[in-house]
Image: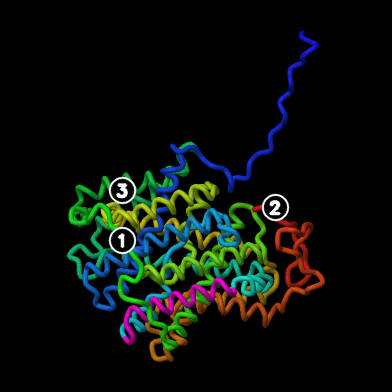
Amino acid sequence: MNTLFPRRRKQPTTPRDPVDSLPPVRHLVPLALQHVIVAYSGMVTVPLVIGAGLGLSPAQVTTLVTANVLVSGIATLLQSLGVFNIGVRLPIVMGSTFTGITPAVIVGTDAGLPAVFGATIVVGILTWLVAPWFAKLARYFPPIVTGTTIAIIGFSLLPSTSRLIAGAPTAADHGAPKRLLLALGTVVLVVLIERLARPAVGRFAILIALLIGTLVAWPLGLTDFSATASAPIVGLPHPFSFGVPVFVVAAILPMLVVQVVNMVESTGDTFATGQIVGRDLGPRDIARALRADGVGTALAGLFSSFTFVTFGGNVGLVSITRVMSRYVVAAAGLILVIIGLMPKLGAIVASLPGPVLGGIGIVMFGTLGAIGVKFMIAADFSRPRNHLIVAIAFGFGLMPVGAPEFYAHLPSALQTVLSSGIAAGGIAAFVLNLLLNGVERKDTAHDRSGEGQGTDHDAHGESAPAQPNPAS
């Protein structure tokens, strides 16, 4: 043995935080594609519905779709990678929200699309400005509130998958058995892969189910890629496609209401993501996430798109695959940017069979609802008051889902809030918790900004073990 030059012992390496880990490219790309596929239908649906509601031409609707996908990619990059104090640096996908559809159609009909985009720019800037103050409300969102809100987000989105599965009501094969069986087969395939495949393969369960489902749909006549032939290969969106934005108070006010709802939803989804990846988020983290919402929304107004929010379905995907790397989501954002610049790629993704996408949606949205339930369990359910909070909040949250016209005769401002089950349920949980449980005392409040350690205290002074809090 050489005693003059002894062999150095290997120093033990600290395992890298999975959020900040970078998978190899052979895994990174397909994992990112899964996020794109899960989010893409929602990104396309919002501009399609608004365009149809305003009677726009196919070329104008294409402009809206392309801009929406492009800005979604940019906002996702901001949220996952972070720039200065913008972006929470977690695996979160951004996209336009269904909550903004009705106000956009109403404002667009009365004042034109330039007024819609002007209001979108204003509320985006205001979101960026108020993010630090709104984030300080985090102590008003204990598990009973955040869990209930997240569960409502997931479960209230589930019915939207029925339209993908059954098809258009006017279609000849609307609700045909082959469509229902294809959706069921997609769900079963995800379950089988999760049960039988190795973990390395299970991470790609959604992508595998999508590919196999599309191949099965082809001979059944449930795929239509004809639109891809006419789509241009390259298309560069440019600002102010519908004219210079107009700033109208009557347009800004309803958009402000929508944006408050979006901020509540983004807060819930961000907390859910933190729960999945094992990070205890505080006001600073929430503020960074909301700033990304604001910047994304302001950019959306410049490029002819609509208000932005975190995508709950992709939160569910992170939970299923257990792939927590923010670089996977950043790669998904980059793919979205490329799709936004290449309409032909977007047309291919948009042509994927609805029943398969609907089956995947059932898994994703249901998973998000389950995450909310897991969050709620952290609350003390031996207290009947907490049962009451959940019961009433779910009542408000699911009422608009089962009866969309329930609030049709109320003033438009109230309709905007109450017709969104997410908004109505989240607000109900928030208010009921204040009334029944009060507010966490300042002298026992745990510093959730990422610097405190020890125990967390709920609104009743009961302690729970602190969650791990790696530096972001």
- Point out which mark residue 468 bears: 2
> Residue 268 is drawn in which quadrant?
bottom right
Closest to the camera, between mark 2 and mark 3, is 2
Which x, y percent locates residue 376?
A: 62, 65
Residue under the image location 59 percent in, 75 percent down = 130
Which x, y percent locates residue 79?
A: 52, 59
Task: Kindly report the distance in space between the C-alpha atoms of the residues bearing marks 3 and 1.
Answer: 12 Å
N-terminal of the pair, mark 3 or mark 1, is 1
> Which residue is denoted by mark 1 in the rendering?
165
Identified by mark 1, the residue type is: Ile
How crowded pointer 3 is (Cα within 10 Å; few <14, some 14-19, many 20+) is rated as: many
**Does the rendering let one see residue 353?**
no
- Secondary structure under tag 1 reads helix
Identified by mark 3, the residue type is: Gly
Which x, y percent locates residue 305?
A: 37, 69
Identified by mark 2, the residue type is: Pro
Which x, y percent locates residue 153?
A: 49, 68
- Secondary structure under tag 2 reads loop
Residue under the image location 22 percent in, 67 percent down = 59
> Which residue is denoted by mark 3 in the rendering?
213
Residue stretch in magenta: 110-130
Task: Kindly report the distance in space between the C-alpha atoms of the residues bearing marks 2 and 3.
Answer: 39 Å
- Of 248 and 164, the residue lying toward us: 248
- Secondary structure under tag 3 reads helix
